[in-house]
Amino acid sequence: MNTRTDTFIISRHGWKIIAPLATLTLLLLLSMGLELLTFILLVILGCVLYRHRNPERISNFAQEGSILCPLDGKVKKISSIENSPIDGKPGFEIVVESGLRDVAILRAPLKAKMSIEKLQRGAMLSAKSNEYILNENALIRFSSSEGDIMMKHTLGSWTRPLVFGVEGEINQNQRYGYMLNGISSIYLPSNSRVAIKEGMGIKAGESIIGFFS
């Protein structure tokens, strides 16, 4: 497991794409000038750089017992469930969909011990596909003295494999992984309360999604 924390302005997970694209664009710019092809590559490079941005995030509302949002996206569903994957007991499920315009960096919701319980490599199909359950996914547990939280990250289409850079003790808001786009289920235990609503846009490391009772 790579324990480095990705703190660069442009995420290191994008360097393999950005480096050759930037080199090609520079060579064409020097040899051809600002021709149509060079302009198109500049636009593509700008989009790729924007997609791999890695901003600093600080929540002004974080406090003891607060649960930070782990990813950027839109809240699609909030529901009570009878058999939570945390412990098989009642709890809450928050479904968040992240798109290509959202920051791809994943952040720890609380200070806890992080463990990857399952990482299943698979397809990268559209969320509207009947075979979406075959997509690459990971089940992550965050264990703390106040309670456990679990995440299920499932990749969408037109993306790259899930990447996790840390495992073990982790601080609240610390970067722990990278998901270019997809759907995530956040599971909260029964001794927590949800602080967001369906349809809200939320940001990793800034938005508070709930509190421990």
Image (cartoon, rainbow, N blue to C red):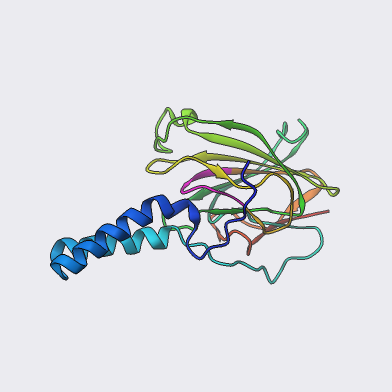
Res 99 seen here: no
In this rendered view, identify the residue nearer to me: 31 or 195: 31
Q: Is residue 147 left or right of residue 60?
A: right
Indicate whether residue 101 is drawn in magenta. no
| Residue lying furthest right | 145
Q: Is residue 104 left or right of residue 5?
A: left
The quadrant of the picture occupied by the N terminus is top right
Picture coordinates of residue 176, whole percent (x, y): 63, 50
In this rendered view, identify the residue nearer to me: 209 or 64: 64
Prevailing secondary structure of the magenta residues:
strand
Picture coordinates of residue 119, whole percent (x, y): 59, 33
Q: Is residue 201 left or right of residue 140?
A: left
Residue 47, quarter of picture: bottom left
Residue 21, quarter of picture: bottom left
Tell me: residue 130, above or below residue 80. above
**At x 26% / y 64%, what residue is drawn?**
26
Res 74 seen here: yes
Picture coordinates of residue 154, whole percent (x, y): 52, 38
Q: Is residue 174 left or right of residue 133?
A: right
Please provide the residue range marked out in magenta: 176-184
**At x 20% / y 68%, what residue is drawn?**
30
**At x 76% / y 36%, what residue is drawn?**
90
**At x 63% / y 61%, what residue is drawn?**
205
Picture coordinates of residue 137, whole percent (x, y): 54, 35
